[in-house]
């Protein structure tokens, strides 16, 4: 389709796994010509359903980059490319001429992007880029409760999913800069940075903290707000601040009366509520709870959400006739842009397009008009943030990291998420806060001026509330027709639950991740990290940047939309539904011990800790058996349990088996590590209330760009007077707004005060 946003952009993709292929699929389905380069043996993931979903809409060529001829053919291919994406650590990238210096010297307009396990500027850059191993080394496994003692890996591949969106957004940012300056350049991210983007919800260090700014895994037991019904189905509930009186729901009242008495049902771990829910089936509870406007979803198996009526009516799935799996239902687009993206073709067969691609290579012209780079990649972009909680505010914060001027509007009493200050801090740095009541006439005037000022308006308000305040798309475009409108919803705009409340935890359940994290036959496990909130925000970032690029390229302002349900659907990309028999394609599953997906991909207890091991081929699994000194797979665990971890890791390394020590309680060690500080994975700044604040830092590495880390998350209205003056209000008018309670700040909620 010639009208798609990235039409005319060619991307050469040398990645495997999840993060790289998912990033390039997003770009392919928004118009880019993605040429997937494979060896003669093919992508190692080809045998799995994940290959079909992650690599559709691409073309496949075969060449061997380890030969002189293969590298020569790759060079010819790169002369026609705008972007090359790889997952080679620096020493391997240099061997292939894909290090930043060699590639940009040879191809000045080329954008060189990579996704590794760890950033190229970090000493760990040569360590394996495997999700399980990065979870172990980063400390993520020590942050989760499970159905047993010890560290718990997440079956949801959190580092990889986040890194996919970071990679795609970094590439689009580079395209925006290249269009303005004529210069190519590099952008790199990693699975570690993907992990940090989510761990930021828990990881921080403040000079003057309050208790609510400190979080650990013990605040979220694995069955938090999960309740088993009489039919064995588990429900995940979300009832912030006990907004809904569960005891007043008619079915609850009826069951309590039958069971002999009135009990207190408040609190998410209430045993009385567990007893009540256990007495009726999920078919009875779901409509009863939904009628009361309680956020609730069942814990489904992975892939089942592809059948959900709300998924179907919102168009979150797509039908693809795959050459391996046949006609199938797959997860659709992760967001909608204008012009709309599209699935262009099934995943290619190995080398399907080799002759076609090499027979039509046309070298890209090198720009002859080159201008200076801005200090920050998105310098000059103005963003108005009207979001709340996590899925709304995180994308604007990342735009601010990239250099945009982001103004956050919040009520005079403060944003609702300030009740959870650790969340506020995670998604608000680098922003300016304006505390104003936009329900008043004076507040609406302030809002109007800000909309006139902005290039982008981003929020996750409910459509009815947004329309009432005039911040829906129609209301905003009436003020500023050139605005880019970015919106995040819960369930989407159609279907029986379009108006239902939505929270990360219930979508984790609906998407199958509670069941998958709990292991086969185990109790469902909720992840305390807002994995789908953050992934939704990251996907919204990608869509917003595409809209920014499109406006720069065509002058046309567009809209981008995503939702928590759409994101939940996208994360089903490890599987698909085969239409021939309506079955869900197989995918790797955790075992009941919550240690991994099999003997060659799991964590093992040792005499002095845990190690993570990846040995999935027959040869490596045989080597693991020999190293353990046993002949049966079932005996490996006991054999390794008496070994010291250091000795065992050295022996594994000598056999070529990838492994890592599982770090626990690693947050402060991570912050204190100078290598992490030097790589800007750790940043610090002065906070108006908490003193010096340290947080996870850069989620990208641009070789010739700085990122912004000079402003901690603001307190309520920290910049109100500054922004109002910038909008043209004189001092007397500002004082009148303060006196009338229309504007306020700086201040903090009462419970933020230090005791």
Image: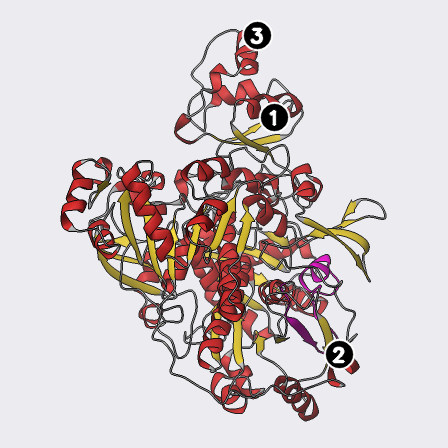
Give whichever of 634, 99 is nearer the camera.
99
Q: CA distance from mark 2 to mark 1?
A: 51 Å
Give the residue at mark 1.
286
Compared across the picture, whether 434 is left or right of 76 comes to left
Give whichever of 493, 153 is nearer the camera.
493
In the figure, 89 relative to 18: above or below?
below
Q: Is residue 39 on the magenta stretch?
A: yes
Q: CA distance from mark 3 to mark 2?
A: 67 Å
Residue at (57, 49) in percent of width and height: 567
Q: CA distance from mark 3 to mark 1?
A: 19 Å
Residue at (74, 64) in percent of width and height: 347
Few, some or many C-alpha atoms within 10 Å of disc 1 (few <14, some 14-19, many ≥20)?
A: some
Q: Nearer the viewer, mark 3 or mark 1?
A: 1
- The picture places residue 295, in percent across and down from the top left corner, at 52, 31
**Which numbered circle lies on residue 40?**
2
- The picture places residue 511, in percent across and down from the top left corner, at 61, 43
SS class of the residue under badge 1?
Answer: helix
Few, some or many C-alpha atoms within 10 Å of disc 3 (few <14, some 14-19, many ≥20)?
A: few
Question: Where's the C terminus, which quadrant?
Answer: top left
Question: Where's the N terminus, which quadrant?
Answer: bottom right
Give whichever of 260, 326 is nearer the camera.
326
- The picture places residue 461, in percent across and down from the top left corner, at 45, 41
Q: Is residue 737 on the magenta stretch?
A: no
Q: Which residues are magenta?
A: 30-56
Give whichever of 539, 574 is nearer the camera.
539
User: Can residue 612 be seen in this snapshot?
Assistant: no
In the figure, 177 relative to 545: above or below?
below
- The picture places residue 503, in percent across and down from the top left corner, at 49, 39
Circles 3 and 2, Cβ within 8 Å, touching? The answer is: no
Circles 3 and 1, Cβ within 8 Å, touching? The answer is: no
Give the residue at mark 3.
258
């Amino acid at each position: 389709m010639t009208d798609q946003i990235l039409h005319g952009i060619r991307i050469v993709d040398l990645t495997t796994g999840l993060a790289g292929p998912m990033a390039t699929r997003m770009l392919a389905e928004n118009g880019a010509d993605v040429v997937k380069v494979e060896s003669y043996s093919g992508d190692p993931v080809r045998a799995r359903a994940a290959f079909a979903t992650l690599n559709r809409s691409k073309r496949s060529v075969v060449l061997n980059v380890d030969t002189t001829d293969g590298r020569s053919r790759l060079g010819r291919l790169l002369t026609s490319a705008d972007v090359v994406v790889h997952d080679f650590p620096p020493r391997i990238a240099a061997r292939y001429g894909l290090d930043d210096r060699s590639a940009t010297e040879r191809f000045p307009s080329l954008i060189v992007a990579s996704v590794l396990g760890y950033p190229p500027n970090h000493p760990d850059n040569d360590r394996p880029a495997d999700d399980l191993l990065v979870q172990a080394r980063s400390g993520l496994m020590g942050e989760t409760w499970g159905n047993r003692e010890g560290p718990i890996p997440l079956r949801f591949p959190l580092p990889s999913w986040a890194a996919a969106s970071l990679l795609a957004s970094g590439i689009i940012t580079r395209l925006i800069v290249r269009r303005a300056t004529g210069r190519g350049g590099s952008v790199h991210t990693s699975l570690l940075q993907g992990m940090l983007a989510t761990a930021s919800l828990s990881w921080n260090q403040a000079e003057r903290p309050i208790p609510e700014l400190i979080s650990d895994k013990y605040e979220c037991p694995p069955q938090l707000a999960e309740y088993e019904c009489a039919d064995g189905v588990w429900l995940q509930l979300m009832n912030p601040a006990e907004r809904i009186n569960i005891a007043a729901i008619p079915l609850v009242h009826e069951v309590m009366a039958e069971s002999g008495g009135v009990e207190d049902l408040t609190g998410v771990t209430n045993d009385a509520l567990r007893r009540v829910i256990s007495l009726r089936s999920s078919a009875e509870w779901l409509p009863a709870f939904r009628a009361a406007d309680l956020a609730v979803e069942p814990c489904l198996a992975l892939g089942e959400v592809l059948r959900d009526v709300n998924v179907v009516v919102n168009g979150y799935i797509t039908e693809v006739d795959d050459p391996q799996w046949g006609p199938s239902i797959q997860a659709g687009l992760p967001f909608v842009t204008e012009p709309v993206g599209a699935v262009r073709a099934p995943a290619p067969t190995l080398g399907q397009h080799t002759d076609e691609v090499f027979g039509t290579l046309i070298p890209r012209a090198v720009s002859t008009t080159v201008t200076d780079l801005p200090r920050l990649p998105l310098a000059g972009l103005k963003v108005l943030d009207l979001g709340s909680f996590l899925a709304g505010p995180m994308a604007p914060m990342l735009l601010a990291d990239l250099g945009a001027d982001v103004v956050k509007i919040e009520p005079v009493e403060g944003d609702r998420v300030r009740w959870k200050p650790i969340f506020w801090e995670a998604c608000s740095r680098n922003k300016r806060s304006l505390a104003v009541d936009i329900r008043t006439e004076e507040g609406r005037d302030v809002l109007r001026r800000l909309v006139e000022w902005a290039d982008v308006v981003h929020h996750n308000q409910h459509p009815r509330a947004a329309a009432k305040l005039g911040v829906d798309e129609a209301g905003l475009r009436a003020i500023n027709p050139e605005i880019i409108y970015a919106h995040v919803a819960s369930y989407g705009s159609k279907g029986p639950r379009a108006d239902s409340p939505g929270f990360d935890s219930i979508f984790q359940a609906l998407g199958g991740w509670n069941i998958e994290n709990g292991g086969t036959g185990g109790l469902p496990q909720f992840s305390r990290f807002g994995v789908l909130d953050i992934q939704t925000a990251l996907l919204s970032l990608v869509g917003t940047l595409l809209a920014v690029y499109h406006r720069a390229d065509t002058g046309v302002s567009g809209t981008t939309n995503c939702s928590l349900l759409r994101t939940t659907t996208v994360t089903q990309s490890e599987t698909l539904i085969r239409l021939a028999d309506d079955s869900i394609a197989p995918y790797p599953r955790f075992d009941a011990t919550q240690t991994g997906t099999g003997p060659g991909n799991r964590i093992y207890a040792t005499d002095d800790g845990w190690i993570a091991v990846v040995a999935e081929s027959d040869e490596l699994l045989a080597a693991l058996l020999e190293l353990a000194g046993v002949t049966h797979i079932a005996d490996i665990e006991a054999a390794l349990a008496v070994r010291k971890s250091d000795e065992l890791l050295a022996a594994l390394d000598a056999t070529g088996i990838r492994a890592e020590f599982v770090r626990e309680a690693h947050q402060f060690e991570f912050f204190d590590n100078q290598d992490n500080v030097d790589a800007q994975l750790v940043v610090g700044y002065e906070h108006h209330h908490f003193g010096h604040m340290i947080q996870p830092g850069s989620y990208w590495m641009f070789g010739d760009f700085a990122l912004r880390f000079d402003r901690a998350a603001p307190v309520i209205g920290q910049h109100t007077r500054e922004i109002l003056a910038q909008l043209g209000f004189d001092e007397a008018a500002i004082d009148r707004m303060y006196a009338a309670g229309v504007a306020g700040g700086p201040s903090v909620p009462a419970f933020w005060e230090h005791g």
